[in-house]
């Protein structure tokens, strides 16, 4: 029994260390919102002109920076698409993934339907200082309230949006 308790404590300590390291990495890699980002108009692949302030006014918005060449994005993009299909407030940014036609073809091959801003030269991502894909930013009422990088689950995304709505 004492051995089992010791293993439990060690497992708990390992879990706490992993969580602390993950939080520190998120803090170090957090994107920085550019000045007046909320009023900047962005064009989606389907020709719609949107602003982050407008999209986040009534409910939190998930902005998802991804790339067609990103290995981790293969796992996170379907979760973001599911969230959006269920009525989630989502806008995605395709980072250096080709021209509009190439991004549209990639989405069609993957059978994904997402609102996408194509950042073919990486200018928008550079303004946000996004250095890692995938990067998730939650904006509520025109203000950045959360961000994370790397893999996260569908439920992790839902939880972040729910928390931002409180």
Image: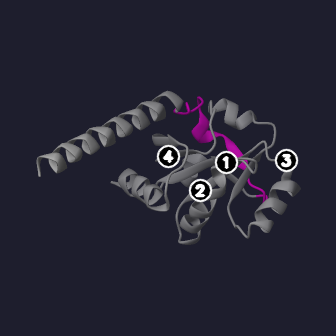
**54 or 89: nearer the viewer:** 89
Indicate which disc, 4 or 3, sits on the residue closer to the N terminus.
3
Indicate which disc, 1 or 4, sits on the residue closer to the N terminus.
1
**132 or 53: nearer the viewer:** 132
Q: Mark 1 points at which residue?
A: 66
Q: Residue 139 carries which label?
A: 4
Can residue 96 be seen by looking at this rendering? Answer: yes
Q: Name the residue under label 2.
A: 76
Q: What element carries label 4?
A: strand
Residue drawn at point x = 59 percent, y = 56 percent: 76
- 145 left or right, relative to 85: left
Q: What element carries label 3?
A: loop
Between marks 1 and 2, how big is the CA–CA gap? 9 Å
Q: Mark 3 points at which residue?
A: 98
**Residue 65: x, y in percent?**
64, 46
Between label 4 and label 2, give the one nearer the viewer: 2
| Location of the C terminus (image quadrant) | bottom left
Quarter of the image where one finds residue 113: bottom right
């Amino acid at each position: 029994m004492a051995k089992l308790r010791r293993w439990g404590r060690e497992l708990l300590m390992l879990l706490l260390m992993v969580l602390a390291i993950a939080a520190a990495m998120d803090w170090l890699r957090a994107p920085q919102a550019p000045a007046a980002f909320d009023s900047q108009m962005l064009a989606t692949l389907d020709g719609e002109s949107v602003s982050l302030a407008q999209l986040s006014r009534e409910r939190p918005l998930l902005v998802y920076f991804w790339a067609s060449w990103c290995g981790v994005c293969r796992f996170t993009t379907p979760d973001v698409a599911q969230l959006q299909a269920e009525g989630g407030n989502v806008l995605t940014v395709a980072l250096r993934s080709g021209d509009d036609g190439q991004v549209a073809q990639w989405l069609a091959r993957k059978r994904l339907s997402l609102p996408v801003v194509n950042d073919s030269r990486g200018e928008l991502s550079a303004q946000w200082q996004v250095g890692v894909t995938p990067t998730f930013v939650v904006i509520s009422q025109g203000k950045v309230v959360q961000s994370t990088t790397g893999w996260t689950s569908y439920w992790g995304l839902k939880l972040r949006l729910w928390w931002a709505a409180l």
